[in-house]
Amino acid sequence: MDALTLRALCMDLNRRLKLARVDKIHQPSERDLIFTLRTREATHRLLLSAHKTFARAHLFTGERPKNPEEPPMFCMLLRKRLESGRLLEVRQQGWDRVLEFVFESLNEIGDTVQHVLILEVMGKHSNLILTTANDAGQPERIVDSIVHVTREMSRVRQVLPGLPYQPAPPQNKKSYLEVTVEDVAALELSEKSGKRKNLALCGLVAGIGPTAAREILYRAGSAEEGVPVRADAVVRELRSLVDGVLHGTEHPSIGLDELGIPAEAAPYALHSYPSFRAVESLSDALQLVYAEAVGRVHTSNLSRDLENAVLAHLDRLRGKRQKMQEQHAESQDFEQYRIQGELLTAYAHLVQKGATEVTLPNFYDDEKPLTIPLDPALSATHNAQRYFRLASKKKRALPLLEKELEQIEQDMQYLENILVYLQDANAEQLQALRDELEKEGFLQPKATRKRRSHPQKRASGGAGTPDVYVSSDGYTIRVGRNNAQNDRLTLKSSQPFDIWLHVKDMPGSHVVITANRATEVPERTLEEAALLAAYFSKGRNSANVPVDFTQIRHVWKPNGARPGHVLYDHQKTLYVTPERGHVEEILRRKQ
């Protein structure tokens, strides 16, 4: 958010919230505050965030974020000082990215006092600071802040309880009305690339951020590379855009990227984006854009955490498999130990007392001599019994080791499937994958009071529903996006004559074509389903991926198998290459 956006937001908040009563204050996360404010006309929720990446302020609608069981100290302080008070005004510190919220309330002895809550939108240095106010209503002394800034952190400006409030150092920039054609010409914008061009204009004009600079240059016809920049046109469009925001002739909009995803919010029309959408209020635009951005970061972080956890489990399983394989190879020698015991029993009279080894003719191998290590403290008979016990122990261990190795292979296959499902997973799918990993014992559940008191709610969330696509021939194709979905899709929600597809010998999604007994599935639909099976698999970036297909009635689940693991027969194989262009045509037909 640049200062121009904050100026427009400040005007909007004053218009809608002036003299609103503070009903509730919540702090759902470390740097976010939510005020519930009541006016005669309506109840509003105001979000103030000092997030390191997404610092912002706007009204918002929808479900309020969950709060911690114990409110943080800063939240309790705000409740004590501000709740039941009134918001007198919202103002901006010049053309800085700083908003001041002036509140009036009663103190402990019933006197009317004023406080100023200051939001500083400054990237990683963003902060929320509560101060007392002097007789003129200006910030005076710091009561507390959501982030404490000590001398070790900044020698220029400390933010600590009890210190006088000092505004952030001013920036040496010109007001938009003071900028001249000569100032813009001196920037030599024609010699700069797109981003450097935007930043140069930002460095000259107070309150203008990269988005506004980009829009001004676009409107001036100077945004494209190699196009000479007309300084007079830039100055004209600069003043036109800022005046339009200040006088209400410009209207808020959301800039959309090439995929139609909200990328930027502004108090003016974003012609410089591939497309834009006008919205009713700037708060609506900010809420939508930041929800998208925060959601992407949250999804990315959750995906990364799950991937790291799965990879760590796979590493441990590989180490365990190596150890089990070594023990299995050793246990296969149990017959050799039995033979040594038999020879010691048969030739006990040839074994000298206290010997560490003995060489005896092996009547199991044409009387070839066999050297047998001995325990010198034991007799020949006791050494023979020791070898018989070893042979019996290793023989009993073989099936157990084989069963353990089989389980390890299944677990590794299961986790390899999880890695595939993490590709392109949205927030809901990621949460379903996490729930599945918790249920299977690979992750520890996040124990919260809410989950403990409502365990059925978590179960009802389930694994979600498979993705559904329509083939060129009108057939329904369903794709499981996690192992639990695969089980339900294949074993419960499909009919015996539906067509089941899966990549051959590698992790991937179950894909089912809804069919019927009387009609054969067209070859084009079968190929499109095979492309989806290949795309949602470990073979996404490979050529000639083998995809097996068979009827559902030929697919079954072994007893005790992990979710998503099935066996099948009567299959045929298609070879497809999941080229992105071909797959995208099918992905666009998602229902």
Image (tube, rainbow, N blue to C red):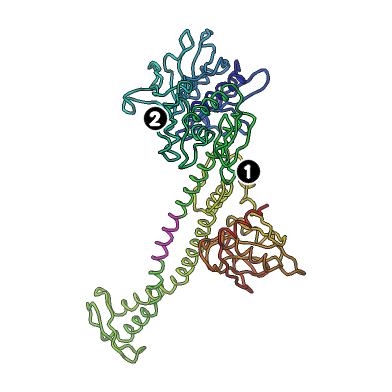
Q: Position of residue 377 (x, y in %)?
A: 25, 73
Residue that appears at 40% across and 38% down: 191
314 in magenta: yes
Three-letter amino acid code of the residue under disc 2: Ala
Q: Residues within 10 Å of mark 1 (few under 14, many from 20)?
A: few
Three-letter amino acid code of the residue under disc 1: Lys
Q: Give the residue number, with chain letter if any, for mark 2.
A: 186
Q: Nearer the viewer, mark 2 or mark 1?
A: 2
Mark 1: which secondary structure? helix
Mark 2: which secondary structure? helix
Residue that appears at 62% across and 73% down: 572
In the picture, measured across the screen, residue 346 lies left or right of residue 230, that is: left
460 vs 267, nearest the viewer: 267
What's drawn in magenta, residue-wise?
Answer: 311-323
Residue that appears at 39% across and 61% down: 319
104 vs 234, nearest the viewer: 234
In the picture, measured across the screen, residue 313 lies left or right of residue 494, that is: left
Q: Position of residue 367 (x, y in %)?
A: 32, 91
Which label's residue is closer to the chain start, 2 or 1? Answer: 2
Principal secondary structure, stretch drawn in magenta: helix
Q: Which label is found at residue 457? A: 1
